[in-house]
Image (cartoon, grey):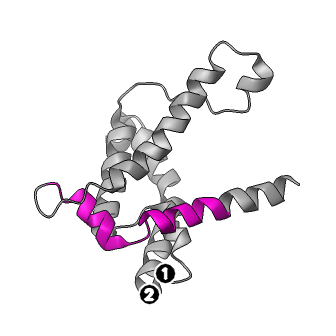
Amino acid sequence: MRAFISFIAGGLFGLGLLISGMTDTTKVQGWLDIFGAWDPTLAFVMGGAILPMALAWLFTKGRKPVLAASFPTPPKPEIGRKLVIGSTMFGMGWGLSGLCPGPAVASLSFGGAGGLIFMAAMLVGMVLAPPIRRRLDQPTAAVYG
């Protein structure tokens, strides 16, 4: 039953991405082009994602552990090297391609070669990220000494 509900939820997510225009790379790049031909319509899509999660966190605050355990905990508000590097790389990839992971998966059936190349590059990045992260986390003295 859980797999069926996950399938339905994933299908609804993909349909929402398609209807909202998040799978249209030119629309996404228009959203990111704030000094050019800016297209603000995707702000409603992002608000539609952020608002329900914020309400869920408020709803579970102070509730019984059984209910609160079914929702992810809010992220810690700390800015570090990993966050800055990761978000910069994510933003560069999103801006250059017009896709992020969710819409990339949703557009696999109609995205053509560009969608497949993005997906392959994303998978390579996911495989390479852990060893690169371990290398960056090593103390500086170990690298030079």
**Picture quadrant where residue 20 is located:** bottom left
The C terminus lies in quadrant: top left
User: Is there any visible trace of residue 145 in the rendered image?
Assistant: no
Please give the count of numbered marks on the rendered protein. 2
Q: Is residue 46 left or right of residue 119?
A: left
In the image, what residue occupies the spot 44% across and 52% down?
A: 132
Looking at the picture, tell me which residue is in the foreground, 17 or 131.
17
Q: Does the magenta run of residues contain 37?
A: no
The magenta stretch spans which residues? 11-34
Q: Which SS type dominates the magenta stretch?
A: helix
In the image, what residue occupies the spot 47% across and 45% down?
A: 48
Residue type of the residue flagged with mark 2: Ala
Residue type of the residue flagged with mark 1: Leu
Whether the residues at callouts 1 and 2 have beta carbons within 8 Å, the answer is yes
Rendered image: mark on residue 113? 2
Rendered image: mark on residue 24? none
- Mark 2 neighbour density, 10 Å: few (under 14) some (14–19) many (20 or more): few
Secondary-structure class at tag 1: helix
In the image, what residue occupies the spot 57% across and 66% down?
A: 15
Q: Does the magenta run of residues contain 25?
A: yes
Q: Is residue 74 left or right of residue 62?
A: left
